[in-house]
Amino acid sequence: MNALLIYPKSPETFWSLTHALRLINRKAASPPLGLLTVAAMLPSDWDLRLVDLNVRDMTDEDLAWADYALLSGMIVQRDSALDVAARCKSAGLTVVAGGPLFASEDERARFGDVDHFVLNEAELTLPPFLEDLERGVSHRTYRTDQFADLTTSPAPRWDLVDPHEYASRGVQFSRGCPNNCEFCEVTQLLGHRWRRKAVSQVIAELDTLYDLGWRGVVPFVDDNFNARGEYLRRELLPALIEWREGKRGMGFSAQVTMELADDTELIELMVRAGFGTVFIGIETMDEVNLAECHKRQNRHRDLLSDIKRIQRAGLQVQAGFIVGFDNDTPSVFQRMTEFIQKSGIATAMVGLLQAPVGTALYKRLNREGRIRVDLSGDNSDGSTNIVPRMGLESLQAGYGNLLRDLYAPKNYYRRVRTFLREYRPRRANTRITPSQILAVIRSFYHLSVVGRERWEYPGLLFWTLFRRPRALPVAVVLAIYGYHYRMCFEPLFSARVSGPGRA
């Protein structure tokens, strides 16, 4: 049996890092970890090919070779997935689909070219599908309301990946989140109960990546990495610290909650284990909005002080923010700009409030008659599927101004310096590689010779070299990221002039 594992094309988004990747000679930010894990669950006598459309095209030869097409993706990849399913079906392949894109019935109704939907967690729904397929009695939809034991989850099939195409490699340690944020679909997809792999599984996956020569960043893709801090302190982080002894390279990142700021021991262990960056969902500084969206973990805090505490410990804070809550007024845009500038959060993903299908927010707004269009899946493209209290035109115009102010070169580089003044990184156990040198040369050309950062970028490099020399690699990366963010958001900057922007 020959099967294509197909990951649809992603549009340019905040996290696609499209423009930044060109400067480091990579085609995509990370491989499709879910498909690589599914690949490890398929029968050993199947021949597999990974077709990541963010890296290469799907050829007629691929289609002629294959019997099955296994398709997975996110909502933001909807258009590409529709094209893929139609092309595979017309080529005579059996099309099997799974993943977040197909979680709702409304989405599945669009995909008439899909023969079988294998939904929820593949550890539970893929085996019965394969058994039925073998017996010739397979059904159209396989789903479950149960959640998998991750100690049975196999290691991803990294052998299917071209190692030169991606900027990072991912590891999943846990699934599920105990929190109940109204707008978030994580608990709908993965449940409230925090489940984890055995530490030995994680170490084995890292060993594989290291043996394959990977020395770059390995994001832990968990939605709530510090949901059980005591287990991290007792088991995982000590194991990671021991594993990294004598090894060069390979740092980590994770998505955490603001509760990390309360646990200085956990922060210290994360830094010692090689974590350099954490992403935190801050969303809003307004207590009324935090109560509205049930973001209990961020309430009654000095958020600015919490951020600075994490930065001073040696972790770069990236963060998500939302505008368009029911209690937001036009003053929110200036207040959020000022907060982000003071925080030194260079990577500030600000989006309009959206309501994913099935979330508590979607159900509430649907009852109120305030769901207006389909969800785009990109929470920073200037669109929203809800009717905001502020008014759509005012919300989108203010959002365009906010992005313009945040990512104007002068403001962005000032924010990077604010961060570097606080940041206290540990001495890295890496050495400079030829690709990093090439990235510096390319970035200098694109940002300082032909770009609008003609003076800001060299100024940042010299400032960092003399004042924070240990943080120079981080300064270069943030400058490259800033270039991508400006290019990505530029179409929205004009919202203040031309009207409401994309609806």
Image (spheres, helix red, strand yellow):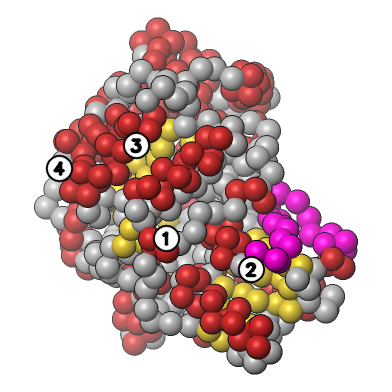
The residue labelled by disc 2 is 43
The residue labelled by disc 1 is 352
Residue 283 shows up from this direction: yes
| Residue shown at the point (49%, 59%) measured from the top left | 154
Amino acid type at image mark 3: Leu
Q: Which type of secondary structure does the marked residue at label 2 adopt?
A: loop
Specify the farthest residue to the top: 466
Task: Give the number of the mark in front: 3 or 4.
Answer: 3
The residue labelled by disc 4 is 262
Q: Quadrant of the C terminus?
A: bottom right
| Residue shown at the point (34%, 53%) measured from the top left | 198
Specify the segment rendered in magenta. Answer: 43-62
- The quarter holding residue 308 reads top left
In terms of sequence position, does the residue under pointer 3 or pointer 2 come before the other?
Answer: 2
Nearer the observer, 250 or 104: 250
Seen in the picture, residue 415 relative to 292 is either above or below; the reply is: above
In terms of sequence position, does the residue under pointer 3 or pointer 1 come before the other?
Answer: 3
Q: Which type of secondary structure does the marked residue at label 1 adopt?
A: strand
Q: Tell me how far mark 3 sits from mark 4, CA to CA.
A: 22 Å
Q: Which mark is residue 240?
A: 3
Q: Tell me how far mark 4 sits from mark 1, CA to CA.
A: 29 Å
